[in-house]
Image (cartoon, grey):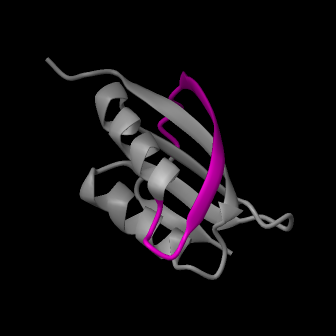
Amino acid sequence: MSETNIRLHAIVHGRVQGVNFRANTQREAAHRRLTGWVRNRWDGTVETVAEGPQATLEAFEQYLHQGPSAAQVERVEVSYSAATGEFSSFNIRY
């Protein structure tokens, strides 16, 4: 029996650009076998979309609240929805 995949969409606020947040997020997602993407936004936040099992996404969300050691996460806006299955891997978007 396989667990149904869902989608997490998150915007991470704080000191999250220039601190390897995207690279570390990609590594965390790949380690958890999630699919999706992460990117820097023009307003200084980091945005990510990830798909996978709910429990795995919840653990990934906890990572987003922490980030790499140089990051200072102030808050994370998170929403969950149905997965689309459109991704085959987890990438950094530029």
- Residue 52 seen in this snapshot: no
Residue 53 x %, y %: 32, 30
Q: Which is more toward the observer, 13 or 42? A: 13
Residue drawn at x 25%, y 22% as measured from the top left: 3
Q: Among all residues in the image, which is located at the extreme right?
A: 43
Find residue 20 and report its horizontal and vertical position in percent. Answer: 52, 78
In this image, 15 relative to 62: left or right?
right
To which quarter of the image does residue 2 belong?
A: top left
> Which residue shows up at 78% across the image and 64% down it?
41
Whole-percent x and y of residue 33?
28, 51
Residue 77 is inside the magenta segment: yes
- Residue 63 falls left or right of residue 38: left
Classify residue 73 by image quadrant: bottom right
Residue in the image at 65% along x and 52% along y: 74
Q: Is residue 40 above or below residue 9?
A: below
Point out residue 28 in the picture as x, y percentages from the top left corner. 35, 60
- The stretch in magenta equals 67-86
| Residue 81 is inside the magenta segment | yes
